[in-house]
Image (cartoon, rainbow, N blue to C red):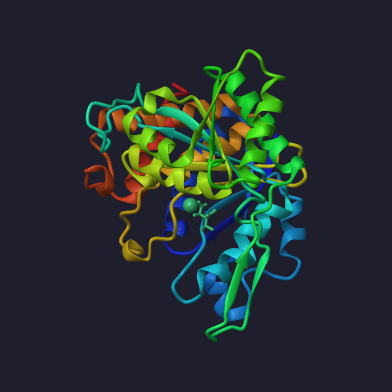
Amino acid sequence: MTYRIAVIAGDGIGVEVIDEGIRVLKAAADVFGFSLEFEYLPWSCTYFQQHGRMMPADGLDTLRDFNAIYLGAIGWPTVPDHISLWELLLPIRQTFQQYANVRPIRLFPGLTGPLRDKTSEDIDFVCVRENTEGEYSGIGGRVHVDTPNEIAIQADVFSRVGVERVMRYSFDLARRRRKKLTSATKSNASRYTMVFWDSVFEQIGAEYPDVETEKWHVDALAARFVTRPESFDVVVASNLFGDILTDLGGAIQGSLGTAASANLSPEGAGPSMFEPVHGSAPDIVGKGIANPIGAIWAGAMMIEHLGENEASDMIVRSIERLTSEGAILTRDLGGKASTMDIGQTVARFVRESQQ
Ligand code: IPM
Ligand code: MN
């Protein structure tokens, strides 16, 4: 089986971590007998400086034919973030209906996270973030710009189709795990959108009597990520809430550098996209010290999505072996290893699994 992968390494450390992700994916493909064809698309803020846009006018059409998209990080100080993101990352998520942004939160064995007394047993859950609408719908405007009368409006958009589908996805996922789904809400203050969100959660929940449900206001839920992470199995959240909660998730994992994410288009309206949660990190670019675990794990999620479950499991087990041994880790995890050391070691562990 051959899969065609569009690679958008993007900006900053995105390029560095994707190289290591690809090294590991190639090892997994060799061992498990499938092939991956990578096509590199140079779309980024550097591309913007040369072409005045983040991707070609037909960029989305180009992506449509791939089996998946593997993305590093987008954003650089030379281009305002709201332009670089709205011309590349966010249109991809919206156009291909990648509505389920799946972000597993795990403290890998052997790592010390910032939460005293919490081990890898305690921190192991998944956040599903709605990824196409909500607070990041992109609808709004500004009038009377730069005058005292200026007004800015940003519309939160919650559609029945949009909320139902992400709820169903989350219930299905919870059913395959420990059968508990927590909904992040804020229906005490957001009396239209979040009251609607709660009612859809309840309606869809009725179809899943075997899944335990609870809804929590997002402020209290954020605190619970810190105090009782072991009480979660699957958390479903709107676009903004999920965005914030998953950076917190990255922190309790020991480092945002280990956090991975899948932007899934479950009905196949287009390819799905896989990326680490971290950004382009201009402060450490070019030093070879970025942690590629998030990118490598995202690569594992990508081949799982393509149906290569055994290979995907082996990559995750190889990351676990790396962190359990603890000898080769990047600085953010208290070690001294380089980005490439991590990629080479995980790739070697994957290859050793064959013997
Ligand atoms: C993420 C990022 C993006 C988001 C930004 C860069 C637009 O923070 O993937 O979490 O908010 O979706
Ligand atoms: Mn984010």
- In screen coordinates, is 4 left or right of 345? right
Q: Image quadrant of residue 345? A: top left
Residue in the picture at 60% in, 31% down: 304
Pick the residue in front: 25 or 146.
Answer: 146
Point 66% across, 23% down: residue = 205
Using the rendered image of the protein, determine whether residue 203 is visible from the camera's viewpoint.
Answer: yes
Picture coordinates of residue 308, whole percent (x, y): 62, 29
Is 321 displayed left or right of 240 in the figure?
Answer: left
Q: Is residue 347 visible?
A: no
- Depth check: give the residue in front, 27 or 56: 56
Height in image: 120 above or below 64?
A: above
Check the picture and name the quadrant holding the N terminus: top right
- Looking at the image, which residue is at 41% across and 37% down? 220
x, y (%) of residue 26?
Answer: 53, 41
Q: Is residue 169 above or below residue 331?
A: above
Give the side of residue 76 with respect to residue 252, left or right: right
> If the image is split into quadrants, where does the C terminus sit?
top left
| Above or below for 49 versus 41 | below
State the image coordinates of residue 125 (x, y, percent, origin top left): 46, 28
Front-most of residues 147 and 297: 147
Vertical order, 35 against 135 (above or below): above
